[in-house]
Amino acid sequence: MTNAEKILHFLNNNDFSYCDDCLSELCKIKPRQQVNQICNNKITDKLITVNKKCHNCEKIKNTRQKLHIHSELQKEKNRPAVKDVQNYNLILTNKGNIHFNYNWTNVYKTDGRAYHFPENPGLIDKKYKGPSVYKWSILGKNGNDLKIAYIGETIELIRRVRHYCNPGPKQKTNVRIKDRFMEYLRTNRIINLEILIFDEIQLNEVTINSSNLLDSNLRKMLEHLFITIFKEEKYILLNKV
Ligand SMILES: [Zn+2]
């Protein structure tokens, strides 16, 4: 067996990435530069070089691994045909064509009053159970908006509110936000909970409406959009931004 064959044989049987030092040792090829030369000469197109953790020594460096060309081709075959790329020239470039009508509206309890932290989340109307993009707003004692907010998104709003009220020790963000809220409460602020309501948006073939909020990518997109908007509007954001 040539040294090149030794390396290929080893990588065929050990489906991970290995650095040249480890390959030299594991395949018993000395000196180590031999391995380096063989791999850099591209002994086969089935071998690729990737900067990642070596499976053996766990150091991040240039490693060699077998290319799984077969599975990649298979994936490509199974993919639905891609439409003409021209179709994806989104109207996004045409300024002013997208009208995004939205509203932040209070979250209400079953008694019809707005929910305020840290009231029992069990009092919140069950219609808010599902996915939401939400905003905690700090209000003055007269209910005036102090433009201090935290924006978040969740698949289950009421459960999420419970986590703010009773954060687990490992829920660092919840612990941090609860601490901030408690400070505001000591100075008679009101912590108001609101959710984002918006009209359906059509982006070519993509329709975005509130029933799509089950999609975490869409929720995150809206969350980040509003973080950007509120930053622009000089809000004090409690998000780490
Ligand atoms: Zn190694």
Image: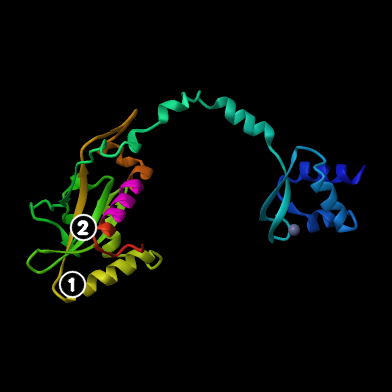
Q: Earlier in the sequence, mark 1 or mark 2?
A: 2
Q: Please, what is the three-letter code of the amino acid marked with disc 2?
A: Pro
Q: At 23% from the left edge and 38% from the top edge, which residue is drawn?
A: 99
**Label number found at residue 121:** 2
Indicate the quadrant containing the N terminus: top left, top right, bottom left or bottom right. top right
Q: Nearer the viewer, residue 202 or 174?
A: 202
Q: State the scheme by which the image is colored.
A: rainbow
In magenta segment, residue 172: no
| Residue 88 in the image: above or below residue 172 | above
Specify the principal SS of the magenta part: helix
Q: At 11% from the left edge and 56% from the top edge, which residue is drawn?
A: 114
| Residue 100 in the image: above or below residue 22 | above
For ligand 1, the image quadrant comes to bottom right
Q: At 20% from the left edge and 72% from the top edge, which residue is drawn?
A: 184
Residue 78 lies, in percent from the top left, at: 56, 26
**Range of magenta residues:** 220-229
Q: Nearer the viewer, residue 235 or 232?
A: 232
Circle 2 SS class: helix
Indicate the quadrant containing the C terminus: top left, top right, bottom left or bottom right. bottom left
Residue 173 lies, in percent from the top left, at: 36, 64
Q: Are marks 1 and 2 in contact (CB under 8 Å)?
A: no
User: Which residue was labeled with disc 1?
Assistant: 185
Q: Looking at the image, can residue 93 be seen? A: yes
Q: Please, what is the three-letter code of the amino acid marked with disc 1?
A: Leu
Residue 230 lies, in percent from the top left, at: 26, 57
Mark pair 1, 2: CA separation: 17 Å
- Quarter of image, res 215: top left
Question: Is ligand 1 less than 8 Å from the beta carbon at label 2?
Answer: no
Circle 1 SS class: helix
